[in-house]
Amino acid sequence: MKKKNILFAAGMGVGLMLTSASVLAQKDSSSVRISFGADVVSSYIWRGSPSMTPNGTTSSLLSPNLQPNLTASYKNFSAGAWASYDFLGSYYETDLFASYTLQKLTFTVNDYFWSYNARYFDYKNASTAHIIEAMVTFNGGDECPFYLTVATFLYGADKKATYDPTEADLRKQNYSSYVEAGYRFKVGASSVTSFIGATPTDGYYGDGAGVTGRANVKGFQIVNVGVATTKDLLISDRFSVPFKASLVANPVLEKVFLVIGFTL
Protein backbone atom coordinates (compact mmCIF):
# COMPACT_ATOMS: atom_id res chain seq x y z
CA MET A 1 0.00 0.00 0.00
CA LYS A 2 2.81 2.40 0.88
CA LYS A 3 4.45 1.74 -2.48
CA LYS A 4 1.18 2.47 -4.27
CA ASN A 5 0.79 5.77 -2.41
CA ILE A 6 4.28 6.85 -3.41
CA LEU A 7 3.63 6.00 -7.04
CA PHE A 8 0.32 7.86 -6.98
CA ALA A 9 1.96 10.92 -5.45
CA ALA A 10 4.73 11.01 -8.00
CA GLY A 11 2.20 10.63 -10.80
CA MET A 12 0.18 13.66 -9.68
CA GLY A 13 2.88 16.28 -9.18
CA VAL A 14 6.13 15.27 -10.78
CA GLY A 15 4.08 13.72 -13.57
CA LEU A 16 3.07 17.23 -14.59
CA MET A 17 6.70 18.05 -15.29
CA LEU A 18 7.54 14.67 -16.82
CA THR A 19 4.61 14.85 -19.22
CA SER A 20 5.57 18.36 -20.22
CA ALA A 21 9.19 17.36 -20.70
CA SER A 22 8.15 14.36 -22.78
CA VAL A 23 6.04 16.51 -25.07
CA LEU A 24 8.86 19.00 -25.51
CA ALA A 25 11.42 16.26 -26.10
CA GLN A 26 9.45 14.99 -29.10
CA LYS A 27 9.72 18.36 -30.77
CA ASP A 28 12.57 19.77 -32.79
CA SER A 29 15.15 20.57 -30.11
CA SER A 30 16.11 23.77 -31.92
CA SER A 31 12.57 25.08 -31.31
CA VAL A 32 12.54 24.33 -27.59
CA ARG A 33 13.61 27.28 -25.45
CA ILE A 34 15.04 26.86 -21.96
CA SER A 35 15.12 29.92 -19.74
CA PHE A 36 16.03 30.45 -16.11
CA GLY A 37 16.68 33.31 -13.74
CA ALA A 38 15.93 34.67 -10.30
CA ASP A 39 14.43 37.67 -8.58
CA VAL A 40 15.46 39.13 -5.26
CA VAL A 41 12.64 40.95 -3.46
CA SER A 42 12.53 42.87 -0.18
CA SER A 43 9.52 40.76 0.89
CA TYR A 44 7.20 38.22 -0.70
CA ILE A 45 3.64 39.53 -1.16
CA TRP A 46 1.30 37.32 -3.20
CA ARG A 47 -2.18 38.41 -4.19
CA GLY A 48 -2.19 41.00 -1.45
CA SER A 49 -0.97 38.82 1.41
CA PRO A 50 2.50 38.14 2.86
CA SER A 51 3.90 34.62 2.95
CA MET A 52 3.37 32.67 6.16
CA THR A 53 5.48 30.33 8.28
CA PRO A 54 4.19 26.80 8.97
CA ASN A 55 2.64 28.02 12.26
CA GLY A 56 0.62 30.67 10.38
CA THR A 57 2.54 33.78 11.43
CA THR A 58 3.98 36.47 9.17
CA SER A 59 6.12 38.42 11.65
CA SER A 60 9.39 36.81 10.59
CA LEU A 61 8.64 36.72 6.87
CA LEU A 62 8.60 40.36 5.87
CA SER A 63 12.20 39.75 4.87
CA PRO A 64 14.05 39.40 1.54
CA ASN A 65 13.27 36.38 -0.63
CA LEU A 66 15.18 34.71 -3.43
CA GLN A 67 12.80 33.57 -6.19
CA PRO A 68 14.42 31.33 -8.84
CA ASN A 69 12.61 30.07 -11.93
CA LEU A 70 13.15 27.53 -14.70
CA THR A 71 10.98 27.26 -17.83
CA ALA A 72 10.93 25.13 -20.97
CA SER A 73 8.87 26.49 -23.88
CA TYR A 74 7.80 25.22 -27.29
CA LYS A 75 5.65 27.46 -29.43
CA ASN A 76 2.58 28.29 -27.31
CA PHE A 77 3.26 25.69 -24.61
CA SER A 78 5.48 26.13 -21.55
CA ALA A 79 6.17 24.26 -18.33
CA GLY A 80 8.49 24.85 -15.44
CA ALA A 81 9.09 25.58 -11.79
CA TRP A 82 9.09 28.69 -9.61
CA ALA A 83 10.20 28.99 -6.01
CA SER A 84 10.59 31.43 -3.15
CA TYR A 85 12.95 31.05 -0.18
CA ASP A 86 13.35 33.74 2.44
CA PHE A 87 16.78 34.76 3.68
CA LEU A 88 15.95 33.76 7.28
CA GLY A 89 15.31 30.14 6.34
CA SER A 90 11.73 30.33 7.60
CA TYR A 91 9.83 30.05 4.33
CA TYR A 92 9.98 27.42 1.60
CA GLU A 93 7.85 27.31 -1.55
CA THR A 94 8.37 25.28 -4.72
CA ASP A 95 5.69 25.40 -7.41
CA LEU A 96 5.23 23.61 -10.73
CA PHE A 97 3.22 24.91 -13.66
CA ALA A 98 2.17 24.14 -17.22
CA SER A 99 0.49 26.62 -19.55
CA TYR A 100 -0.81 26.99 -23.08
CA THR A 101 -1.46 30.28 -24.88
CA LEU A 102 -4.18 30.53 -27.48
CA GLN A 103 -4.19 34.00 -29.04
CA LYS A 104 -4.90 36.34 -26.11
CA LEU A 105 -5.84 33.64 -23.61
CA THR A 106 -3.40 31.67 -21.46
CA PHE A 107 -4.58 28.52 -19.66
CA THR A 108 -2.43 27.46 -16.70
CA VAL A 109 -2.35 24.65 -14.16
CA ASN A 110 -0.36 25.49 -11.03
CA ASP A 111 0.84 23.08 -8.36
CA TYR A 112 1.58 25.10 -5.21
CA PHE A 113 3.61 23.69 -2.34
CA TRP A 114 4.61 25.94 0.56
CA SER A 115 4.57 23.60 3.57
CA TYR A 116 8.18 22.76 4.38
CA ASN A 117 7.31 20.24 7.11
CA ALA A 118 4.91 18.29 4.89
CA ARG A 119 5.76 15.35 2.61
CA TYR A 120 6.18 16.62 -0.95
CA PHE A 121 5.13 13.38 -2.67
CA ASP A 122 1.88 13.03 -0.73
CA TYR A 123 -0.86 13.85 -3.24
CA LYS A 124 -3.76 12.14 -1.44
CA ASN A 125 -6.55 14.72 -1.30
CA ALA A 126 -7.26 14.14 2.38
CA SER A 127 -3.68 14.72 3.55
CA THR A 128 -1.70 16.52 0.85
CA ALA A 129 -0.16 19.95 1.43
CA HIS A 130 -0.24 20.68 -2.30
CA ILE A 131 -2.86 22.95 -3.86
CA ILE A 132 -3.74 22.46 -7.54
CA GLU A 133 -5.07 25.58 -9.25
CA ALA A 134 -6.66 26.22 -12.63
CA MET A 135 -6.06 29.72 -14.01
CA VAL A 136 -7.08 31.62 -17.13
CA THR A 137 -5.58 34.97 -18.15
CA PHE A 138 -6.71 37.34 -20.87
CA ASN A 139 -3.92 39.64 -22.11
CA GLY A 140 -4.94 42.37 -24.52
CA GLY A 141 -1.39 43.09 -25.70
CA ASP A 142 -0.01 46.41 -26.87
CA GLU A 143 -3.20 47.47 -28.63
CA CYS A 144 -5.22 46.90 -25.45
CA PRO A 145 -2.87 46.91 -22.43
CA PHE A 146 -5.43 45.31 -20.14
CA TYR A 147 -5.32 41.90 -18.48
CA LEU A 148 -7.79 39.81 -16.50
CA THR A 149 -6.93 36.70 -14.46
CA VAL A 150 -9.36 34.22 -12.93
CA ALA A 151 -7.96 31.45 -10.70
CA THR A 152 -9.52 28.71 -8.55
CA PHE A 153 -8.04 26.10 -6.21
CA LEU A 154 -9.43 22.75 -7.37
CA TYR A 155 -7.64 20.09 -5.34
CA GLY A 156 -5.60 19.60 -2.20
CA ALA A 157 -5.04 21.62 0.96
CA ASP A 158 -7.88 24.10 0.51
CA LYS A 159 -10.59 22.53 2.63
CA LYS A 160 -13.82 24.28 3.59
CA ALA A 161 -13.36 23.22 7.23
CA THR A 162 -10.21 25.34 7.40
CA TYR A 163 -12.27 28.52 6.98
CA ASP A 164 -15.63 27.40 8.37
CA PRO A 165 -15.49 25.82 11.85
CA THR A 166 -19.06 24.55 11.45
CA GLU A 167 -18.11 22.35 8.47
CA ALA A 168 -18.06 18.71 9.59
CA ASP A 169 -16.74 17.18 6.35
CA LEU A 170 -12.95 17.55 6.52
CA ARG A 171 -12.58 16.34 2.91
CA LYS A 172 -14.82 18.97 1.30
CA GLN A 173 -13.00 21.33 -1.06
CA ASN A 174 -13.52 25.07 -0.61
CA TYR A 175 -12.58 26.15 -4.16
CA SER A 176 -11.02 29.44 -3.03
CA SER A 177 -10.98 31.82 -5.99
CA TYR A 178 -9.21 34.99 -7.01
CA VAL A 179 -9.90 37.51 -9.78
CA GLU A 180 -7.48 40.27 -10.81
CA ALA A 181 -7.70 43.02 -13.43
CA GLY A 182 -4.86 45.28 -14.43
CA TYR A 183 -3.88 48.03 -16.86
CA ARG A 184 -0.37 48.68 -18.19
CA PHE A 185 1.01 52.05 -19.28
CA LYS A 186 4.24 54.00 -19.62
CA VAL A 187 5.55 56.85 -17.48
CA GLY A 188 8.76 58.09 -19.06
CA ALA A 189 11.16 55.15 -19.28
CA SER A 190 9.24 53.12 -16.70
CA SER A 191 6.56 50.50 -17.33
CA VAL A 192 3.67 50.81 -14.86
CA THR A 193 0.84 48.41 -14.02
CA SER A 194 -2.16 49.31 -11.90
CA PHE A 195 -4.18 46.36 -10.57
CA ILE A 196 -7.06 45.33 -8.36
CA GLY A 197 -7.75 41.82 -7.08
CA ALA A 198 -10.74 40.32 -5.29
CA THR A 199 -12.09 37.06 -3.94
CA PRO A 200 -15.74 36.27 -4.66
CA THR A 201 -16.32 33.92 -1.70
CA ASP A 202 -15.05 32.85 1.72
CA GLY A 203 -11.76 31.03 1.62
CA TYR A 204 -8.02 31.44 1.41
CA TYR A 205 -8.09 35.15 0.53
CA GLY A 206 -11.03 36.22 2.71
CA ASP A 207 -11.19 33.95 5.73
CA GLY A 208 -14.48 34.18 7.60
CA ALA A 209 -13.19 32.06 10.48
CA GLY A 210 -10.13 34.21 11.07
CA VAL A 211 -7.81 31.22 10.76
CA THR A 212 -5.26 33.16 8.71
CA GLY A 213 -5.72 36.52 10.39
CA ARG A 214 -8.65 37.75 8.30
CA ALA A 215 -11.25 37.74 11.07
CA ASN A 216 -14.95 38.40 10.46
CA VAL A 217 -14.57 38.50 6.67
CA LYS A 218 -17.16 36.74 4.54
CA GLY A 219 -18.16 36.73 0.90
CA PHE A 220 -16.83 39.06 -1.78
CA GLN A 221 -13.84 41.13 -0.71
CA ILE A 222 -11.21 43.28 -2.43
CA VAL A 223 -7.88 41.92 -1.21
CA ASN A 224 -5.21 43.35 -3.51
CA VAL A 225 -4.97 46.92 -4.83
CA GLY A 226 -1.85 48.61 -6.02
CA VAL A 227 0.61 49.77 -8.60
CA ALA A 228 3.83 48.17 -9.84
CA THR A 229 6.62 49.59 -11.95
CA THR A 230 9.74 48.30 -13.66
CA LYS A 231 12.79 50.10 -14.99
CA ASP A 232 16.17 48.99 -16.31
CA LEU A 233 19.06 50.37 -14.29
CA LEU A 234 22.04 50.93 -16.60
CA ILE A 235 25.21 49.53 -15.03
CA SER A 236 27.43 49.94 -18.10
CA ASP A 237 27.06 50.39 -21.85
CA ARG A 238 26.44 46.66 -22.24
CA PHE A 239 24.81 45.69 -18.97
CA SER A 240 21.63 46.71 -17.16
CA VAL A 241 19.64 45.29 -14.24
CA PRO A 242 15.82 45.28 -14.28
CA PHE A 243 14.53 46.86 -11.08
CA LYS A 244 10.93 46.75 -9.90
CA ALA A 245 8.81 48.26 -7.15
CA SER A 246 5.25 47.60 -5.97
CA LEU A 247 2.93 49.43 -3.61
CA VAL A 248 0.27 46.97 -2.45
CA ALA A 249 -2.74 47.50 -0.19
CA ASN A 250 -4.96 44.78 1.26
CA PRO A 251 -8.18 46.30 2.66
CA VAL A 252 -9.10 43.02 4.37
CA LEU A 253 -5.85 42.81 6.30
CA GLU A 254 -5.77 46.60 6.65
CA LYS A 255 -2.12 46.50 5.57
CA VAL A 256 0.01 48.31 3.00
CA PHE A 257 3.27 46.88 1.64
CA LEU A 258 6.05 48.56 -0.34
CA VAL A 259 8.21 45.99 -2.11
CA ILE A 260 11.33 46.53 -4.21
CA GLY A 261 13.38 43.97 -6.11
CA PHE A 262 15.63 43.21 -9.04
CA THR A 263 16.09 40.43 -11.57
CA LEU A 264 19.31 38.47 -11.92
Image: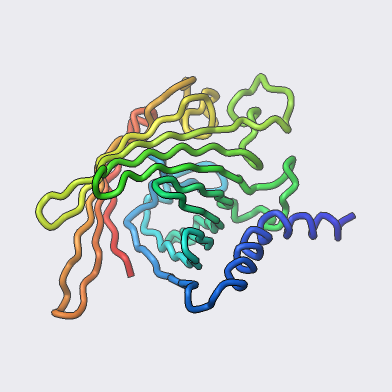
Expressed as whole percent of the image width and height from the top left, the position of residue 197 reads 37, 34
Quadrant for the C terminus in the image: bottom left
Which residue sits at x=58%, y=52%?
113
Please state if 86 lies on the left or on the right of 211 as rendered.
left
- Above or below for 239 versus 169: below
The image shows residue 34 at horizontal and vertical percentages of: 47, 72
227 above or below 42?
Answer: above
Confirm whether residue 146 shows in the render.
Answer: yes
Residue beneath the point at 33% across and 58% down = 41
Does residue 46 appear to the left or right of 118 in the view shown?
left
**Is residue 249 visible in this depiction of the protein?**
no
Q: Is 147 situated left or right of 231 in this image?
A: right
Residue 35 vertical placement versus 147 (above, below) = below
Farthest residue to the left: give it. Answer: 188
Q: Residue furthest right?
A: 1
| Picture layout, residue 50 above or below residue 179 | below
Which x, y percent locates residue 261? 29, 59
Find residue 184 and report its image quarter: top left
